[in-house]
Image: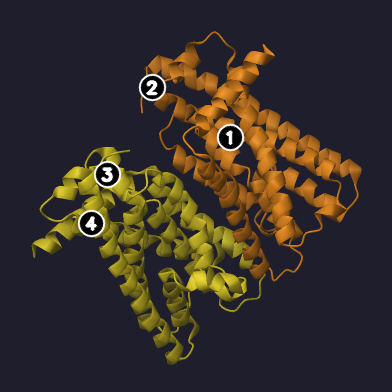
Chain colours: A orange, B yellow
Amino acid sequence: MLRRFSHQAWLNFKGANAAFSFEEFTLLRLLYPLVTLTFYVLLAAYSFNAENLTHWVVGNSFLLCVNVSLFTLGQGFDSERIDGRLRSIIVAPENKLVAVLQKAAFPMLVSVITVFAGFIVSSLIFSVPFYEINLWLFMVVVIVSMFAASGLGLLLAALSLMTDSMHLILNTMNYVLMIFCGANFPIAQMPAWAGVLSQALPLTRGIEAANMLFTQNNPAAFAGLIFGEFVIGAIFFLLAFLAIKYAERTAIRRASLELF
Amino acid sequence: MQFLRVIWDTLRLQMKNSFVRPMFRFCLIINPVANTILIYEMFRNSGHDNFGTFVILGAGLMALWGCICFSSAGDINRERWSGTLSMIYTAPAGFQVIILGKILGNTLLSLLTLLISFVTARVLYGAFFYLPSPFLTLFSLFCAVVCFIVFSTLIAYLLTLSRKTTLYMNLIEIPIVLLCGFVIPISFLPPWIHPLSYILPPTWAVRLLRLSIQQTGNAEFFATLAILTLITALYGAASLLLYKVIDKQIRKSATLEVF
């Protein structure tokens, strides 16, 4: 069971990235995210006139996960449709939650590596004292946050069974995360509804917890944030599962499963 | 006359084709709104003078560049996927004229991003767009549009050589925004990056637009205009040269429609 799960998870990941050569994979997954991170941190340094850039390095490192968690994962079912594999997945006598988790496993792992590597490299560039914090705890925050972000990615992936505007939806969600997660400016300066939306999104609590490692020692609040992030992730995975079931039924009723 | 008709028809068709694509609609409508909110929130406590104008222009230009990246730059590849590349390549009207019409259509439609950025800042934040010399700003905008058209033509031709257009389209968006000073002045970047910024035409177009708003001396404005004209002409010449090279290579190796 576990072997089949890992085999399928690997095949899913390999299929999504097989079109890229090593150089292209490096450009897209490492260099480009790093340039994007540098851009937003520099923008923060200029706009806030800040010397200590820790908050923005942490926040934008976490946002690096969107490349994989949002864009790769979010287009998962769309690419299955294009490749003609969607029908087999839907009619297979397998729990759809397993199919969902298979798709998320390796992207989650790549996201964790990207965020962690992005954080270390950008910390070196912008002189953030990353060696002063407990990196194991930071890793825990990253893992839980990537779990939550992958949940959101999968929920969006389920939408691709119902709409053909995935580029629009995924790019919009990318901006929603950039604006409402508190990575680039304090959410408190926005209206109250923005605070509510912010709390319903993945990464918000993760970014806050990671920043807490630099600013204060409050284990109870830290654990609360991690737990909250995990719950948000679990809710998104559950919603993704329900959305896939709903999309499956709708598609079968309308015979539109493989329509573009 | 026929040249203008081809340009006009291609331009109209391109606007319609671009607008039906969800990704272009994102670049045209959602991107400027989101950019304006993000950048305005980052700058609202910055203490910069006339920052509303700076944000509107920066966010609008970022979105304009996004539209160019995800449309003009990939148009030749899109024609290839649609199976129409060989037809427009061999059409009596001329491939270069058709490409010019397409890029012109995209760029003119993309100018809406500046308006959307302004409306967003005005409605959400009550921000003002203060123009000390509207005529000078309009003239600068015209120069910027010409520059963007020439620059995107070169990129479109370059991407014709590649079969990984989507990848490169994604890769050039943020680096150009960063290098050309769309929202962060080049002087804020490390000095070793400056030469790279100076050889890119959008750097001078953005600088000209900013100078038209900042009410600096005429000498600096006209010096920037002269550099922009020169560098745009050089890129235009490079585009023509590149087209000839690509044309020769395509005819020799018969790879126009190879994926």
Mark carried by residue B11: 4
Mark 1 crowdedness (10 Å alpha carbons): few <14, some 14-19, many ≥20: many
Residue B167 appears at what percent x and percent y? 45, 45
Element type at mark 4: helix
Q: Nearer the viewer, mark 3 or mark 2?
A: 3
- Tell which subunit mark 4 falls on: B
Residue density around tag 2, few if under 14, some if 14–19, many if 20 or more, within 10 Å: some
On the image, the x and y values in percent for residue A153 come to: 58, 34
Residue A249 is at least partly visible in this image: yes
**Lower sequence index among marks 2 and 1:** 1
Location of mark 1 (residue):
A153
Q: Upstream in the sequence, badge 3 or badge 4? A: 4
Q: What amino acid type is highlighted by mark number 4?
A: Leu
* Residue carrying label 2: A258
Placement of the C terminus of chain A among the 4 image quadrants = top left
Q: The residue under label 1 is which amino acid type?
A: Gly
Q: Relative to residue B150, is residue B10 depicted above or below?
A: above
Mark in front: 3 vs 4:
3
Q: CA distance from mark 1 to mark 3?
A: 31 Å
Q: Chain of mark 3?
A: B
Q: Is residue A100 left or right of residue A61?
A: left
Label 1: state its secondary structure: helix
Residue that carries the numbered disc 3 in the rendered image: B79
Report whether residue A161 is seen.
no
Q: Residues within 10 Å of mark 4 (few under 14, many from 20)?
A: many
> How far apart, in angstroms, are the residues tagged by discs 2 and 4?
34 Å
Q: Is residue A23 left or right of residue B106?
A: right
**In this picture, is B239 found above or below A104?**
below
Q: Could you say which is closer to the camera, residue A230 or residue B3?
A: B3
Q: What's the residue type where badge 3 is placed?
A: Glu
